[in-house]
Image (spheres, coloured by chain):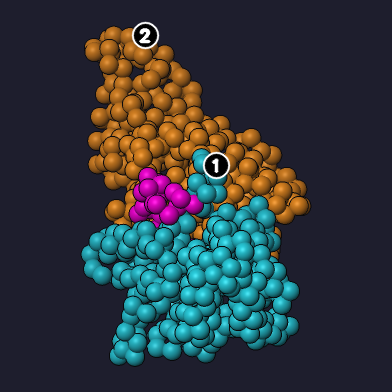
Chain colours: A cyan, B orange
Amino acid sequence: MNIKQNTDKPEVILTGDRATGPLHLGHYVGSLKQRIALQENHEQTILVADMQGLTDNAHQPKKVSANILNVVADYLAVGIDPAKTTICLQSQLPALAELTMYYSNLVTISRLERNPTVKHEIQSKGFERSIPAGFLTYPISQAADITGFNASLVPVGDDQLPMLEQTNEIVRKVNSLAGHSVLQECKPLLSDESRLPSTDGKNKMSKSMGNAINLGSTEKEISAAVKSMYTDPNHLKVDDPGKVEGNVVFTYLDAFHPDKNYIHQLKAHYQRGGLGDGTTKKILEECLQDMLQPIRLRRNAFLNDKAYLVDILCKGSQISREKTSQVLFKIKDIFGLNIF
Amino acid sequence: MNIKQNTDKPEVILTGDRATGPLHLGHYVGSLKQRIALQENHEQTILVADMQGLTDNAHQPKKVSANILNVVADYLAVGIDPAKTTICLQSQLPALAELTMYYSNLVTISRLERNPTVKHEIQSKGFERSIPAGFLTYPISQAADITGFNASLVPVGDDQLPMLEQTNEIVRKVNSLAGHSVLQECKPLLSDESRLPSTDGKNKMSKSMGNAINLGSTEKEISAAVKSMYTDPNHLKVDDPGKVEGNVVFTYLDAFHPDKNYIHQLKAHYQRGGLGDGTTKKILEECLQDMLQPIRLRRNAFLNDKAYLVDILCKGSQISREKTSQVLFKIKDIFGLNIF
């Protein structure tokens, strides 16, 4: 963690996920573990970003909503505690849409088109000029999310740093218009953990690519995913020396196996030869089955009580509506619009 | 009027003004007169578009809010009756901002850039690529306004027809996503009156150009505006024959003088020579003074009772919040987002 724990002045943290699919081990390593730690000493809100999820999924109108409760179940299953972390739903917070409208007047189209994250995403999604307006402008909506909660700290991957720059530019414009400090700039919180590779060792993990192990994966799915995992393509016979770098099985063992010393010895054995991929995969599978079984059971139990999940989201959204409305009031004040 | 009066099925009409300045005689001829007639037989809402006003005025944060009550006073002074017409404030209707967010995912940036009205406005405002995102996307926000009220009829100038096309495209996309008819397409209501020229006969009327006669103009301002009015530049001596076409004094006399026959004779006299511009201007000034004096007095009385104006807006916005929330509910339903 890059931030001090047990500080007297806890940070206000906003984080979240687009509700476009179930969460997987990449989310666990990249953000969920961090959130479980952060909730102990900070004011943390997790935003289930359904509206942002729709910016490139509106043609599948129910895809996002079908995932909302799954994502909440994922949170609770891994140990996000709704008594410590506010979990809320973006579409339940009209102030965020209103803030987006006000901020939209402070950002030019050419500035949005220069945003490296958006540029990359437009390319990878093949949008070209047919990019939905909501997708090009989603950095503005994200700025509304961050500032709407007065967040001082935003956990991000380094590919998301341009989004925070965009947010802070808006913050500075708002403060300059107001003539005093209304919003605060946010700082990024970069994870110490490196990004977990996909099981095929090639792409970013994604449900549609079938190269991710979801937190709710069944025993069989975990087993199949580990068996198909990318290792060292030149490690043909058991006796051959094998490569550990880029070998996804070892990357996952590093990330999840509790006995680091044992993994160290295992790597040495693999490198000098005599250790088959079948054996390393068996070790990894056992480790992942042990880790994911209780998460899966909890997740299923939560999903069997949807009313409880809705209640968590509803209460979190109620708290968040109050917070975001207060920020909206301040922004409307700059424009003299708190008339009644 | 292009629509039937006293019909059994009254149209739902949405109209409005950007609150960027006081209303002038161009508004009176182009829209206010029509609204006064329409309110008798139709369900009419007038939206004071403060948020749209900010799309190209955010750098002057109080310009829009300073004009809101003036515009409401203008409405009441000319005869818009709040018992017959709902007058509401855009920034008080969060559902419109939320609808804008949902619709933004259904419209591409290139489609917005092809909008002839926006294209022209971008050129005339000199934005080029520095166009604020909120300005390029305001047709989406306007579609939210129109559909948010379920408007079937929208009074527009012909330069605004592309905005209604854009709205109806969104309507069709929404209905196609839903698989049934959720929103209705709107029809334009074009005014029979041609656009009133500015006093200098050159540009579109605007406060900043100083070429408009506002509804609240003082006696002196009216007098000065008429005296400086563009006539026939070749009509140098009283005895010379004068041109009536393009002569702003006659255009205004046509628009405002109650005695059409008298104006007909006056034109003939001017055309054959012997009638000076001083005389025609005196006739026009008297006509405008007579017409604007009671409007000015009522306007000032309303502006002396700001609490009343706020109350009108507040009540109208309350009614409108209910209407627009119902439409938002239907749109969120398409995306499965009415979770709690």
Compute the Cα span from label 1 to label 2. 61 Å
- Residue drawn at the location 62% of the way across and 46% of the way down: B170
Q: Position of residue B100 (x, y in %)?
A: 54, 55
- Residue drawn at the location 53% of the way across and 66% of the way down: A242
Q: Is residue A108 magenta?
A: yes
- Residue drawn at the location 27% of the way across and 12% of the way down: B234
SS of the residue under disc 2: helix
Picture quadrant where residue A151 is located? bottom left
In front here: B225 or A113? A113
Q: Position of residue B258 (x, y in %)?
A: 47, 32
Task: Determine the chain carrying the residue at label 1.
Answer: A
Asked if residue A30 lies left or right of residue B151, the reply is left
Crowd rating for badge 1 (residues with CA inside 10 Å; few <14, some 14–19, many 20+): few
Look at the image and give the residue range highlighted in magenta. Answer: A96-121
Q: Hey, what amino acid is under mark 2?
A: Arg
Asked if residue B130 shows in the view, the reply is yes
Q: Which residue is mark 2?
A: B272
Q: Position of residue A54 (x, y in %)?
A: 59, 58
Crowd rating for badge 2 (residues with CA inside 10 Å; few <14, some 14–19, many 20+): few
In front here: A219 or A232? A232
Q: Hey, what amino acid is under mark 1?
A: Ser
**A158 lies above or below A257:** above
Q: Position of residue B43 (x, y in %)?
A: 63, 53
Q: Which residue is mark 1?
A: A130
SS of the residue under disc 1: helix
